[in-house]
Amino acid sequence: MIQWPKTNDAIGTANRGNPCESGLCTLCRADCQGKCETFMSSMKGRKILYPRDFGTVTAGSANTTAIGVSYNSLRIQGYNYGAYGLPKGLSNSADDCIFPNVNIETEFGNKVKTKARVPIMTGALGSTFIAAKYWESFAVGAALVGFPIVVGENVVGIDKQAVIENGKIKKAPELDRRIETFLRYFDGYGAIIVQLNVEDTRNGVAEYVIEKYGDKVIIELKWGQGAKDIGGEIQVNDLEYAIFLKNRGYVVDPDPTKPEVQAAFKAGAIKSFARHSRLGYTNYNKVEKVEEDFSRAVRHLKKIGYKRITLKTGSYGMEGLAMAIKFASKYGLDLLTIDGSGGGTGMSPWNMMETWGVPSILLHSKAYEYASILAAKGQRVVDMAFAGGLAREDHIFKALALGAPFTKLVCMGRALMIPGFLGANIQGVIDPSSKAKVNGNWDKLPASVTELGTKPEEIFAGYFDVEKKVGKNEMKNIPLGAIAVWTLSDKLAAGLQQLMAGARKFTLKQISRNDISSANRETEKETKIPFITDYQDEIAKKILES
């Protein structure tokens, strides 16, 4: 097992817990006081792109990319001449070919295009309580920056205030809050996406959303995710709430309606209950039947008014991957998110998350291969987003290149949640009256924050950028978590622009698989990305022999 380093002395960051491939801790806490790279980037922004203490240090690479097969074993190519995809009005002069001129806007969609200012989107933030607690920071931040955010599964089903009668939602206050928070600052970039699982479909979520919000919302069919191969879970520690969820139609473990379980709970032997969703497509054992059902679901969603439909799939294996790509392409979906194992979760069985499914880089490599088969036959290929343990700007570049030209976005889960936690904790200290509302966890600012300042405008590098966008008077309504999301996004954007400029690619459409290479032979074998010194070797020899 590869052990990722816990500290990075060059940029002055450290992990609280055990770091994983993404650079995040395996267990990411909302009350964490720092200071991993994502945590610090949410305050310092693009400053974290560079080694610390300039003027008193020199820095050298601690490269470990030659170990194992992962996104970290891909290398990004740089070139010493040329410039491709310069925006209109710019020339190939050295004055115009600068990284701030790299255009990282993207779009996805079949007939209706959805634009984003940066090629990222959130993972599904559904019924886990942590998603609900920090939603305002996540949603306002996504809307201000201009990237898609996903309302995950079961939000209506677990809402005590939701009213569902005969499979039709009469009232869904939590879902309304999620959607309306994003739309409050939506300016045409990004999107709000609402997921459907088995229970959501039964509860009539799609019908409720289209009737109330029309084409302002994208609907997403949920096949699965990379963190687990069963339905979503949450944990509750209230017996009455557990019984409520059982009566709502969920699987609750252990069964809270059993007298012996209730007795164990009252005695303290059982302290919590796990609520589970159901598996989809259990009544079919043939691919053809699954396709019929999928086609029927898509037709229904289009019939009731949805103009944009997406699909989220997990790391089921090659057959499931091929089905997702084929069906999403054939039936005109707007985006397919492919989530590999190695990503994160609000709650999953731990050993399941550790041992099931296809690791991201392998799944994404096959996704490119399968998409290319359809393209070679002249068939439309659905736009894709890659997900699963991606957190940094180099991950974004590599994922876009690995799946080029089919990948339009990189889906990030925990990485885009960390700034929400951080901002809420800071806000709760600076304004104690708001602590409960924003779910702050700190009683005082830790050293990782006070080294930057004690006021929001001192702490967040992106503070005045947000103020310029919304105006001074509106700043009082912007949660600090949203400012942190903006600041992290700015760091990711600047880092991506720099990598693209080095590859001489000035728009995302110019990124290709030729812009990455494999750091070891095993990675080359699995990804079909050439080994570093093999790429361009024949061209090099022609130069020498000319």
Image (cartoon, grey):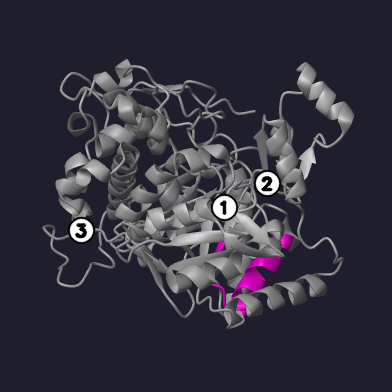
Q: Residues within 10 Å of mark 2 (few under 14, many from 20)?
A: many
Disc 3/disc 2 C-alpha distance (Å): 42 Å
Along the horizontal axis of the image, is 129 left or right of 280? left
Residue toward you, 285 or 2: 285
Along the horizontal axis of the image, is 158 left or right of 545? right
Where on the picture, by quarter, is residue 305? bottom right
Q: Which residue is mark 2?
A: 232
Residue 357 can be seen in this image: yes
Q: Give residue 12's position: percent from left, percent from top.
A: 33, 23
Q: Give residue 335's position: percent from left, percent from top.
A: 53, 67
Give yes or no for residue 322 being in the magenta stretch. Answer: yes
**Residue 101, labelled with which disc?**
3
SS for dot 2 = loop
Residue toward you, 89 or 439: 439
Q: Residue at x 77, y 21 (%)?
A: 266
* In this rendering, the label closer to the viewer, 3 or 2: 2
The residue stretch that appears in magenta: 320-336
Q: Which residue is mark 1?
A: 152
Q: Amino acid at mark 2?
A: Gly
In which quadrant is the C terminus drawn?
bottom left
Disc 2/disc 1 C-alpha distance (Å): 10 Å
SS for dot 1 = loop
Q: Residues within 10 Å of mark 1 (few under 14, many from 20)?
A: many
